[in-house]
Image: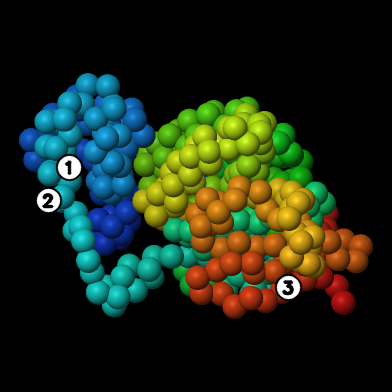
Amino acid sequence: MAMDAEDQVVEPALGIDEDDDISIFQDIDQLQNHGINIADIKKLKQAGINTIKGIQMTTRKKLCNIKGISEAKMEKIKEASAKLVLTGFSTALEYAEKRRQVFKVSTGSQELDKLLGGGMESMAITEAFGEFRTGKTQISHTLCVTAQIPGNNGYSGGKVVFIDTENTFRPDRLRDIADRFNLDQSAVLDNVLYARAYTSEHQYELLDFVAAKFYEEPGVFKLLIVDSIMALFRVDFSGRGELADRQQKLAQLLSRLQKIAEEYNVSVFVTNQMTSDPGAGMSFQADPKKPIGGHILAHASTVRVSLRKGRGENRIAKIYDSPDLPENEATFAISSGGIIDAKE
């Protein structure tokens, strides 16, 4: 029995818990009560800063670079925001309580979910890397649908933002996956916000729009997908001469993604490509290929998952790096309905 389209359209969470409101969606408009004028608040919003936490996450130098924000105004804004939000240390117990807001988005495969400790975690960046045809884009498309389905531990389901850098997004693919879960196709597509990025700069600029959208509709969006994170950087920066510049720009993009994940409590899923490692032969590595993006990307991703081909439609996922998950493997399969458990 297919769900009615009206039932599937995700509405803004108007009754957000008061604690959640303070820790995630503390509105920048509150600065008015602390002597900051509305014109300056508007300038901050235009620069993609919509929350008190957003001010905390922005350096003084960057605030001063916003047109119309002088050094004196910047200090006043920083001072006012410090009064509104607790800065500094908290106990591990207090932080554990805050981490209870974290949710997991299912991948569509129970085995892959188990490997990831329940699914794609919110307030974190999950990176999947592999060669072509290892299932990166298929996982992305499946997540567009599974993120909308209410799940375990009170997960309510929500909308998805998809940033496509390689022109691999196919709405018809979502229709097939929606059929697998008996969902209304049009409603599923209506809950996915899509953007095609053409340059690495455009990719970064889109994140300002994403932050504004997450701010406008608090609690509605649950997942941000970037497929793939490095493709445009490879095109825009070539050769060793531009490597330092590329890595700096990449670091800024990843920092922005991490801040968005934490600020708005969303899950961020990025895919990444592989490259041959010319020095691998010297160290007798079993696999001479490695993910691109270097140490910058390696440190920015909370969880890194390596994908490789198995037999037929089967694919093997391995935890490559994680702060709390054991190094393990899981086998999943690609079907017409998206990512599923592998048939033995």
The residue lying toward the viewer, choosing from 274 and 137, is: 274
Question: Is residue 179 something one can see in this rendering?
Answer: no
Q: Residue furthest front?
A: 282
Residue 148: x and y, percent? 58, 54
| Badge 3: residue crowd in 10 Å (few <14, some 14–19, many ≥20) | many
Q: Are marks 1 and 3 in contact (CB under 8 Å)?
A: no
Which badge, 2 or 1, comes first in the chain's sequence?
Answer: 1
Which type of secondary structure does the marked residue at label 2 adopt?
helix
Q: How many marks?
A: 3
Q: Amino acid at mark 1?
A: Lys
The residue lying toward the viewer, choosing from 248 and 186, is: 248
Q: For marks 1 and 3, give the CA distance.
A: 46 Å
Q: Amino acid at mark 2?
A: Lys
Residue 91: which quarter of the image? bottom left
Question: Is residue 344 something one can see in this rendering?
Answer: yes
Quadrant containing the C terminus is: bottom right
Residue at which label 3 appears = 330
Q: Which mark is residue 53?
A: none
Q: For marks 3 and 2, give the CA distance.
A: 47 Å
Residue 335: which quarter of the image? bottom right
Residue 68: x and y, percent? 22, 21
Residue found at x 76% / y 61%: 282
Q: Is residue 154 left or right of residue 93?
A: right
Q: Amino acid at mark 3?
A: Ala
Residue found at x 31% / y 47%: 57
Residue at which label 2 appears = 83
In the displayed structure, 198 sits above or below 166; it is above
Which badge, 3 or 2, comes first in the chain's sequence?
Answer: 2
Q: Which mark is residue 78?
A: 1
Which type of secondary structure does the marked residue at label 1 adopt?
helix
